[in-house]
C-alpha cells in the first residue's frame, strides 16, 4: 500500500484508491487506528472461514449449521465448489452447444440471475443477439427470463422466438436453462413451466433441450427431481455457496463457458485476490480496507447510501449484482449476538457518464450521507475516436481527435474532483481491463469486502432471514 496516497491492490491488477474518503468532514487516521483490533479479528475470522468452512453463528434457514465456501470457489480441488472435472465439463458443454444451439434462455432470479448477466456482459460484444451467427462464432443468442414473473415479458419472448423460428424455416434449437438453488422459487419455476409448455405445443417450430442448474437434492429441489425424471442434465449449485456468492461456480461459469469466456483465468484472478487478502497485513489487505472504510463511513459519518458508479455500459450489471450482494448480506435487523442493530446501507447503481445527467446533482448537493464508489477500467476494449464532421462549428473541436474513452475518463475525473472539492466521500476501483483475470479479482474482492464488513459489524453476511416474511404471506395467498 502507498500509505500517503491511500492506494492498495494487486501488482498489475485491481487497485483500490481510497484517499478521498479521508480529510475534512470525512474519515480520520484516528478512526482507522481505533478500528485496527476489529480489523485484525475480521482477518482472522476470514482465514478461519477458508480453513474450516464455518462462519460465526451462521445457520441455514432451517436453523442448522451451514458451510460458507465462497472463497473456495477460487480453488479447483476435489470437494470444493469447482473441481478440475467440473470446469472441464463446463468447457465441453460450451463447445457442444456451439453450432448446435441457436438460442439459450437462462431462467433464474436473484443470485441465480444477476451473476449470469454480469458474465454475459463481460463475455459478449454489445448487441450480441443481433449479430449474425458467424460474428458470434457459432455461439447461441442468450435471453433471460424468470427474473420476474411478468406475463407480458414472457409472452414477448415466446413471440420473438416464434418469429425467429418461422424466419429460419427450420426448427429453432432452443436450450432452456432453469437455474435455482432451492429448485422451488416461484419466478423461474413458473416462467420455465410456461415457456416449456408453449414450446412443446409448437413442436414443429422448436427443438427443445433443457439443462438444469440446482441443488442436487431430490427431497429439497423440485427442479432436480424434474431433471431426473425427464433425463435433463443437471449441474450442481454446491452446498455452502449462497445465491449471491455463486457467480464463480456452475451458475455463473456456465454462462462464461457457453460464450467462450476464459473461466479458468476468471478463477485465477479470484484466487490471486483471496491469497492476497488472506496473507496481507490488515493495512495492506484491499478488501478489508474497503470494508473498514465503508463501515466507518456508515458508523461515524452516517453514510447509509453507497452509489456503485461504473464508467461504461458493460459495468451496469455488475452494479446490479453488487446491489444484491450488499443488500442481502449486510441489511440485518440483528447482530450475531441477537442485539437489534438495523445494520446496512442502501446500494444504488449508477452508470458514468449517463447518470451524471440525473443523479450527480443529488450526489454533489444533496444529503452528506453517501459514498460514491467509482469503477474505472483503464484500457478500453475499443479505441473509438470522435471526428468533427462540422468544421464550421468550432465548439465540436474540443472532442475531435479524442478517443471516446478519453472523454469518459475526463468525466470521471471531473466528477471525483468536484465531490472532493466539497469534502464528499468517494473512492475508486481501477481495473487494467475487463479481461477475465481482472474481472475475477474484482468479483472476489467485492465478495470478500462484504464478508469482512459482516465481521466488523458482527452481522451474518450469509443469511437473508428478512425475505421469509413476505414469502410466508405470498405462499399462503397462492395456496388458496
Ligand atoms: O442470495 C440468495 O440466496 C437469493 O437472492 C437467491 O439467489 C434467490 O432468491 C433465488 O433463489 P434460488 O436460486 O433458490 O431460486
Image (spheres, rainbow, N blue to C red):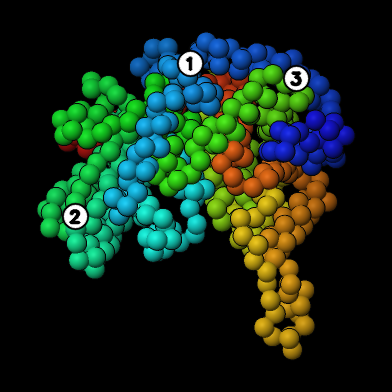
Q: Judge left or right: residue 348 versus residue 284.
A: left
Residue annotated with mark 2: 206
Residue in the picture at 67% in, 44% down? 431
In contact (CB < 8 Å): disc 2 and disc 1:
no
**The C terminus appears in which quarter of the rendering?**
top left
Residue in the picture at 70% in, 30% down? 286
Q: Is residue 181 visible?
A: no
Which label belongs to residue 281? 3
Q: Nearer the viewer, residue 138 or 68?
A: 138
The reply to whether the residue tagged 2 has its Cβ within 8 angstroms of ligand 1 is no
Question: 239 above or below 229?
Answer: above
Question: 330 above or below 18?
Answer: above
Local secondary structure at mark 3: loop
The crowding category of the residue bearing disc 3, from other C-alpha atoms within 10 Å (few below 14, some 14 to 19, many at least 20), is some
**The N terminus appears in which quarter of the rendering?**
top right
Instruction: Give coordinates of residue 45: x percent, y percent.
Output: 61, 14
| Quadrant in which residue 167 is drawn | bottom left
Residue in the picture at 87% in, 34% down? 4
Q: Earlier in the sequence, mark 1 or mark 3?
A: 1
Q: Could you tell me how far apart the alpha carbons at marks 2 and 1 are, in whole angstroms? A: 45 Å
Q: Judge left or right: residue 124 versus residue 385.
A: left
Residue annotated with mark 1: 58
Q: Could you tell me how far apart the alpha carbons at marks 2 and 3 are, in whole angstroms? A: 57 Å
Q: Earlier in the sequence, mark 2 or mark 1?
A: 1
Instruction: Give coordinates of residue 462: x percent, y percent.
Output: 49, 24
Amino acid at each position: 500500500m502507498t500509505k500517503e496516497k491511500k492506494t492498495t491492490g494487486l501488482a498489475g491488477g485491481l487497485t483500490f484508491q481510497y484517499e478521498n474518503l479521508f480529510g475534512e468532514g470525512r474519515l480520520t487516521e484516528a478512526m482507522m487506528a481505533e478500528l485496527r483490533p476489529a480489523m485484525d479479528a475480521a482477518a482472522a475470522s476470514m482465514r478461519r472461514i477458508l480453513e474450516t468452512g464455518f462462519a460465526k453463528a451462521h445457520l441455514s434457514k432451517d436453523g442448522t449449521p451451514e458451510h460458507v465456501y465462497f472463497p473456495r470457489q477460487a480453488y479447483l480441488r476435489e470437494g470444493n465448489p469447482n473441481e478440475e472435472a467440473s470446469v472441464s465439463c463446463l468447457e465441453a458443454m460450451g463447445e457442444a452447444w456451439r453450432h448446435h444451439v441457436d438460442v439459450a434462455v437462462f431462467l433464474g432470479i436473484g443470485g441465480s440471475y444477476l451473476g449470469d448477466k454480469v458474465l454475459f456482459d463481460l463475455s459478449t460484444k454489445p448487441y450480441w443477439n443481433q449479430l449474425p451467427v458467424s460474428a458470434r462464432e457459432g455461439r447461441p443468442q442468450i435471453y433471460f427470463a424468470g427474473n420476474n414473473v411478468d406475463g407480458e415479458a414472457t409472452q414477448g419472448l415466446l413471440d420473438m422466438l416464434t418469429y425467429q423460428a418461422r424466419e429460419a424455416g427450420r426448427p429453432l434449437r432452443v436450450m432452456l436453462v432453469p437455474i435455482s438453488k432451492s429448485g422451488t422459487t416461484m419466478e423461474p419455476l413458473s416462467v420455465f413451466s410456461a415457456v416449456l409448455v408453449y414450446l412443446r405445443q409448437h413442436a414443429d417450430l422448436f427443438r427443445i433441450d433443457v439443462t438444469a442448474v440446482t441443488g442436487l437434492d431430490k427431497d429439497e429441489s423440485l427442479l432436480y427431481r424434474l431433471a431426473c425424471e425427464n433425463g435433463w442434465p443437471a449441474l450442481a449449485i454446491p452446498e455452502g455457496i449462497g445465491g449471491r456468492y455463486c457467480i464463480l461456480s456452475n451458475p455463473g461459469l456456465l454462462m462464461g463457458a457457453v460464450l467462450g469466456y476464459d473461466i479458468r483465468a476468471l478463477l485465477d484472478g479470484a484466487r490471486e485476490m483471496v491469497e492476497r487478502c488472506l496473507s496481507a497485513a490488515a493495512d495492506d489487505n484491499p478488501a478489508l480496507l474497503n470494508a473498514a472504510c465503508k463501515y466507518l463511513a456508515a458508523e461515524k459519518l452516517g453514510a447509509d447510501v453507497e452509489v456503485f458508479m461504473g464508467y461504461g455500459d458493460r459495468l451496469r450489471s455488475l452494479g446490479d449484482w453488487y446491489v444484491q450482494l450488499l443488500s442481502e448480506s449486510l441489511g440485518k435487523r440483528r447482530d450475531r449476538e441477537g442485539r437489534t442493530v438495523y445494520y446496512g446501507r442502501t446500494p444504488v447503481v449508477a452508470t458514468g457518464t449517463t447518470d451524471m445527467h440525473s443523479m450527480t446533482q443529488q450526489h454533489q448537493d444533496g444529503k452528506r450521507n453517501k459514498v460514491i464508489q467509482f469503477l474505472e477500467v483503464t484500457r478500453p476494449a475499443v479505441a473509438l475516436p470522435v471526428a468533427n464532421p462540422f468544421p464550421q462549428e468550432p465548439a465540436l473541436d474540443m472532442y475531435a481527435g479524442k478517443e471516446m474513452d478519453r472523454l469518459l475518463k475526463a468525466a470521471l475525473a471531473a466528477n471525483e474532483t468536484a465531490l472532493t472539492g466539497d469534502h464528499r466521500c468517494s473512492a475508486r476501483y481501477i481495473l487494467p481491463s475487463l479481461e477475465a483475470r481482472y474481472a475475477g479479482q474484482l468479483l472476489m474482492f467485492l465478495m470478500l469486502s462484504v464478508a469482512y464488513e459482516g465481521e466488523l459489524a458482527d452481522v451474518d453476511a450469509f443469511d437473508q432471514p428478512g425475505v421469509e416474511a413476505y414469502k410466508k404471506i405470498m405462499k399462503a395467498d397462492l395456496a388458496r
